[in-house]
Image: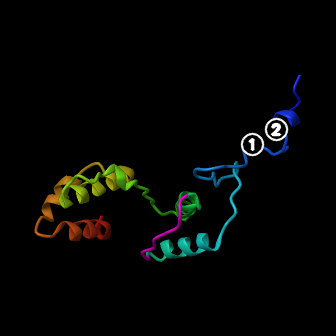
Amino acid sequence: MVDAFEANPSGANPSVYTVGGTVQANERGLYIPREADGELLRLCRESTFAYVLTPRQMGKSSLMIRTAEQLIEDGSRVVIIDLTQVGTQVSAAEWYRGVLALVAEQLELTSGIAEWWEAQSHLGVTQRLTQFFQQV
């Protein structure tokens, strides 16, 4: 019979540690806050544009998830989209409409979005998406 220590020689609880991928920032996981956590959260709370640039496997997804969780706790509505879902072989109008569709889906905005988009046809697609974020 193999005892627990032999099966896990480090003695560590395997559910606490994450190697690769997004760290579970809830009570099941181990997350060490960094300066960037507070800075990104502050910028989001101030509705200030922010971007995170760092190499692979440096915690961008974990930072995003943890910040989103904290914003939700604050009462904010949060949208996380993967822009690769929109595609690259599309026109600018299709790309912006795709972003709008993903945002509307996550916010559960089911009616009137297509009509709103068409009603703004006097604007360029960039302005339309900006207006959507400001008005809707």
User: What residue is rendered at 89% in x and 22% in y?
Assistant: 1
Q: Does the magenta run of residues contain 123?
A: no
Please name the predominant secondary structure of the magenta segment in the image.
loop
Which is more N-terminal, label 1 or label 2? 2
Q: How is the image coloured?
A: rainbow
Residue stretch in magenta = 48-56
- Look at the picture and state if 74 lies above or below 45: above
- Residue 30 in which image quadrant: bottom right
Q: At which x and y percent is residue 69?
A: 56, 58
Instruction: Indicate the quadrant containing the C terminus: top left, top right, bottom left or bottom right.
Output: bottom left
- Look at the picture and state if 8 lies above or below 45: above
Q: Is residue 51 left or right of residue 119?
A: right
Farthest residue in the front direction?
55
Q: At which x and y percent is residue 94?
A: 20, 55
Q: Are marks 2 and 1 in contact (CB under 8 Å)?
A: yes
For numbered disc 1, what is the local secondary structure? loop
According to the image, label 1 marks what residue? Answer: 14
